Amino acid sequence: MDWIAKVFQPQILALLIPVIAIIAIFGNKALKAHHQHLERMEKIRNGIDPDANE
């Protein structure tokens, strides 16, 4: 449990919070892109042209 005390030191948190935020933002964007890809593939399987709306 000593590692928890080390992590919650202000010096460590000042670096850890932005790093975690950046990783979370990129992870969220990757999941959204993957979901859009799956939706596009499903439209193609169902015979719908996904580019017809543009």
Image (cartoon, rainbow, N blue to C red):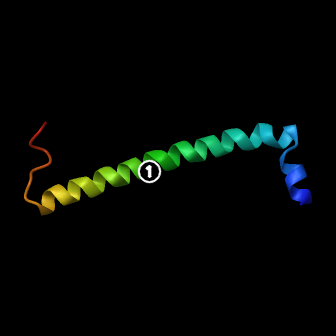
Measured as percent of width and height from the top left, residue 15 is found at 76, 40
- In the picture provided, is 30 more to the left or to the right than 40? right
Measured as percent of width and height from the top left, residue 17 is found at 71, 40
- In the picture provided, is 6 more to the left or to the right than 13? right
Measured as percent of width and height from the top left, residue 36 is found at 30, 50
Relative to 15, is 6 above or below? below
The furthest residue to the front: 1
Relative to 49, is 41 above or below? below
> Which residue is found at the position 67% from the left and 43% from the top?
19
Q: Quadrant of the N terminus?
A: bottom right
In which quadrant of the rendered view does residue 10 lie?
Answer: top right
Front residue of this view, candidates 30 and 46:
46
> Which residue is found at the position 14% from the left and 63% from the top?
45
- In the picture provided, is 38 more to the left or to the right than 49? right
Please give the count of numbered marks on the rendered protein.
1
Front residue of this view, candidates 3 and 49:
3
In which quadrant of the rendered view does residue 52 lie?
Answer: top left
Q: Is the residue marked by circle 1 packed among few (<14), some (14-19), or many (20+) residues within 10 Å?
A: few
Q: Which residue is mark 1?
A: 30
> Which residue is found at the position 14% from the left and 48% from the top?
50
- In the picture provided, is 54 more to the left or to the right than 35? left
> Which residue is found at the position 83% from the left and 49% from the top?
7
The furthest residue to the bottom: 45
The residue type indicated by label 1 comes to Ala
Tag 1 secondary structure = helix
In which quadrant of the rendered view does residue 3 lie?
Answer: bottom right
Relative to 21, is 44 above or below? below
Q: Quadrant of the C terminus?
A: top left
